[in-house]
Each structure stands twice: as C-alpha cells, then as structure tokens.
Amino acid sequence: MQKNKAAVKPIGGYLELELPKGNEYYPDLVHLNTGRNALEYILLQKKYHKIYIPYFTCDVILEPIVKLDIQYQFYHVDKQLDPIIDFEIESDASFLYTNYFGIKLEKIVELSHKIKNLIVDNSQAFFSEPLPGVDTFYSCRKFFGVPDGAYLSIKRKLAKKFPVDNSTHRFSHLIKSIDSGIESGYSDYVNNNKDLENNEIRSMSLLTRKMLSSINYNECVFVRQRNFNFLHKHLAEYNLLKFDATDEHTVPMVYPFLTNDKHLKVHLIQKRIYVATYWPNVFKWTKKNTTENFLAQCLVPLPIDQRYDLQDMFNMLNILRLFL
Ligand SMILES: Cc1ncc(COP(=O)(O)O)c(C=O)c1O
C-alpha cells in the first residue's frame, strides 16, 4: 500500500487560534487573494482587449489592466452614482461598474440587461449575490476583519492552478487593535494594505478562509441593515444622495452621507469618528469641477458594521448633528 505522507494529519503539539467552525458565505465561488486579482482572472479568462472603468473607483483596479496591457477608457458617474453612458460601448469590450456602498443592486440589474460584457465590482457589496452569467468579484476585507481574500463568480474557470497565498504577515493590525485600540493598529493597517499591491494571482490563504468560515453572517446582515436604516431615518432629509431604506436584498458597507460641507469628514475624524475617503486617487484623476471630485471630497461613509449597536449609531448621529 502506498503511503501519502502529505495526507497524514499531525496530532498534538500546541493549540492554535480557536475560531468557531462554520461555513463560508460563498463556498462555491473561486477563492482568490485580492479583488484586483479577481479582476485580473476575469481579464485573462475573457481575453478582453479593452475595459471601461469609472473615474470614481479605487486606483488598485488599474494594476491588472496595466499589467496585462489592456486598453482602458474612463467614464463618469452622476451624483446618484449611476454611470453616464453617452458613448458607444465597443461590442467586444468589457464594462466595469461598482456596486457603490452596496446600494446599487437595481442599477446593476438594469445594466446587466443592456451591457453584454458587464463586470460587477462587488467589493463594497459583499452580500449582493452574483447575477447569473455576470462576472462578479468581492473583496472580503471591506466587510470583515480579514487581511485579504476575494471571491469570484465566473462561468468558466482558468485551467491553471494558482499557488495558495499566505496571510500571516498581514495580520498585525487585526490583532493589535484588540489589545491596544484601533488607532494604534492604523500604521500596520496601512503597511499591510501596501503589501497587497502588485501580487500574483493566488488562491485564498487558509487563514483567511478559516476566518471567513467562522463569521456569523446572519448577524452581520441584521446589524448592518438595522444600523443603516436607523441613520437613514434621521439623515435622509439632509442627504444629497437619494436612496431608499434597505430591503432584505441590500446589505450596505457603510451609510453614504453626501453633503455640501467639504470639511465634514475632517470634523468627524477630529471627534474620533474615522471615515474614509473614497477614493484619494480620484483627486488626481479628475478636475475640481467634476462630480467624482465632489464625491471624493464630500461623501462621508459612516460606519454601520457589525461592531456597532444602536447606541453607537445614536452617539455618532449626535456628533454629526453638531455640524449639520
Ligand atoms: C471599489 C474597489 N474595488 C476593488 C478594490 C480592490 O480590492 P482588493 O484590495 O481586495 O484588491 C478596492 C479596494 O482595494 C475597491 O475599493
């Protein structure tokens, strides 16, 4: 009998990090290391010669496009984050649209009927299920405390087997924040983000996969929707971005609050409400008078995630009200 050494599981030794054993949310999708590499996977598989991308997105999505030397053309979005398609889309080119903050499902369904080679970037919409036949990718770290990881929905897989990633060295911010607070882990977070740049396509690390199998997804959905709807009830009248309260199909990443006050983000950060800028590269890509420049400056993404209860939302709202 042939013995397969690799299959023999070691027994004993020290105990490892204990995580609840559960299931991933997308066990059947392709498991990859990053969202940008999921886009690379699509571009390799589909062999597109050109892609349309929004000015309003993260510059890391250019990594695979530049690497594969694919033509790209920017397009604009309007103040409601809908694409402005006032040009002819070349029939064999692809069109990338982002499910902004997780609230653009309706627009995506509409686009999927009109655009042949639509690619959906669901990095900000983890819980938005892929539409049949529409290439869709997810970046896990925008929704959960994981160092990396991406899922991809694509009909035909590449034949190539990719090496498995290792995430141990990108883990520090996730544990430092528990011991010493979110502020003290911030520089590690920045460095660990840097480490995700220009990597080869790899399969999702076992560590990330294990963490993603330990999450109570029902609870995350419930908390995000509850927090989002609470803020919306109190802020809708001031919000320049118009949308409905969430229904069961929409699980937002943040509450996007659009205001004319370009200093609001700074005021909140000074009060230790850490709101991100989506996305700093937009200031380089666009002129001052463009919608995207305004969005990058004035769109305040308020945290609503599973860490927070309604008391936290109430406290944040009270601070925000000081500046309205
Ligand atoms: C809209 C959007 N798409 C894609 C990505 C890329 O995801 P990843 O960092 O997993 O490559 C990001 C951020 O990094 C993003 O903000």
Image (cartoon, rainbow, N blue to C red):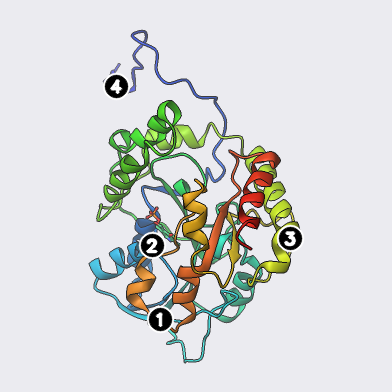
Q: Which residue lies under the disc numbered 1?
A: 288
Q: Are marks 3 and 4 in contact (CB under 8 Å)?
A: no
Cα gap from disc 3 to disc 2, whole angstroms:
30 Å
Q: Which mark is residue 245?
A: 3
Label 4, secondary structure: give it. Answer: loop
Q: Which residue lies under the disc numbered 2?
A: 39
Q: Relative to the observer, which residue lies in front, 223 or 180? A: 180
Label 2 near ligand 1 (CB < 8 Å): yes
Amino acid at the residue labelled 4: Asn
Cα gap from disc 4 to disc 2, whole angstroms:
36 Å
Cα gap from disc 1 to disc 2, whole angstroms:
29 Å
First along the sequence among labels 3 and 1? 3
Q: Which residue lies under the disc numbered 4?
A: 4
Amino acid at the residue labelled 2: Leu
Label 3 near ligand 1 (CB < 8 Å): no
First along the sequence among labels 3 and 2? 2
Other-residue count near label 3 (Cα within 10 Å), few / some / many at <14 / 14–19 / ≥20: some
Which of pointers 4 and 2 indicates the residue nearer the eye? 2
Q: Relative to the observer, which residue lies in front, 59 or 184? A: 184
**Residue 29 in view, yes or no:** no
